[in-house]
Image (spheres, rainbow, N blue to C red):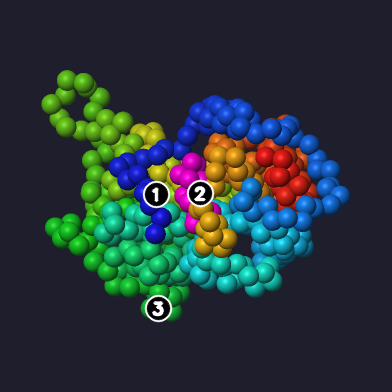
Amino acid sequence: MLSIALKVPRHCQLASAAAAAAAAAAAAAAAAARRSFSSTVTTLQHPSSYIPEPVGNKIAFAFDIDGVLLRGKTAIPEAKPALELLAAHKVPWILLTNGGGKSERERVDELSHLLDFPIAEPQLVQAHTPFRALAQTYHRILVVGGDGDKCRRVAEEVYGFEDVVIPADVVRSDPSVWPFHRYSPEELATIARPKRLYEPESGEAKIDAVLVFNDPRDMGTDVQVVLDLLLSQHGYFGTRRDLHLTHNKNSQVSAPTINDLSIPSVPIYFCCNDLLWANNYRMPRFGQGMFRITIERLYAEMTHGAQLKTTVIGKPFEHTYRYAEQVLNDWRAKRFGGQAALGPEHTVFMVGDNPASDIMGANNYGWYSLLVRTGVFRDEDLATIVAQPKQILDNVKEAVEFGIAHGLQV
Ligand SMILES: [Mg+2]
């Protein structure tokens, strides 16, 4: 069990763009000082030969999945050769994805099949993997997103949450909660469970937190149900907190201020902030970040403009990289033995396709960022992307070749 705990009360808020940029600049400067090779963006010169000795004690890799190893359900052709190269050189690596929606076991089985390369469960960090640390904090949660009841099963059976409600339960209890819901009678009979939801006098009906595990499949229902809870009286469905503002400072009435309203009735956690991601479609698609923006905007509409406080994990946030580094160290020790922790002279190469998540997070954390051209990034966007990579490469195999060739210089 990993020891990093998610800070619970209350909110590691999404950093502002300015703060993120400043942090990125500071981290980039620190990383540059620790490393000898250039941080300018260049196109890779293919190394003509590889050093035959194992280099795993010097370097490690973390890979994004969508747009790096896969597009949709199709393997990117260079993915398998890249992983074979790492195996040949005994280099440890993990997968660090903002995706999820299923258990880690199910995901590695699927990836091993699609990539035709064996991947172990301890090598995978999904967007919601760090949520397992919250199972000791919250008794009853609302889990949002994913197919059917898969995320509920992950939360209960893998992460150990005691009581998990999903929006389908709320619809089953009273379909008028969102009359345009997309659940079939069969789904409501199979994935939804009877739950106590409308008894404010009963502690059992209270929801302690909202955890967004994956992109919504029934957006209308999820938006309505989540906002109902955020605006509820202490986390009880069918109630509404006082939303009247105090305009007079000397008022004796205990109405909330705009700052009070920015704190929702139950905390909400998002595990992926990606606005865009790459699948088989010719253009990037909206990701979970769209859902967060939708929730925040509607919350502001309902609360006189209050800015909803949320907790967002996943790339590019430090918490997730810190968690991933522990996973990488654990995997390195398990797979190769010896000292678990990567020493200060070691380099972790983060290979990703999304500057706003993979690259920004790697730069901030002091990992060496490698941006590939097989996903959401387009060369014409280079001048305006929010985080500049250390290198840009055509694909994941070139990224691995670069790391192996340059890692020995560290
Ligand atoms: Mg990606």
Residue drawn at x 17%, y 20% is 250
Quadrant into which the C terminus falls = top right
Mark 3 or 2: the one toward you = 2
Question: Which amino acid type is marked by label 3?
Answer: Thr
Cα gap from disc 3 to disc 1, whole angstroms: 36 Å
Asked if residue 233 can be seen in this view, the reply is yes
Disc 1 target residue: 4
Q: Which residue occupies 76% across, 62% down?
A: 81
Q: Position of residue 96 (x, y in %)?
A: 56, 54
> Which residue is under mark 3?
190
Residue 300: image location, x then y, percent: 40, 38
Label 1, label 2: how far apart the Cα atoms are: 15 Å
Element class at badge 3: helix
For the point 36% across and 67% down, the residue is 156
Q: Residue 341's mark?
A: 2
Give the amino acid type for the residue marked by disc 2 in the picture: Ala
Question: Is 214 positioned to the left or the right of 262 in the image?
Answer: right
* Part of the protein shown in magenta: 317-330
Indicate which disc, 1 or 2, sits on the residue closer to the N terminus: 1
Residue 281 appears in which quarter of the rendering?
bottom right
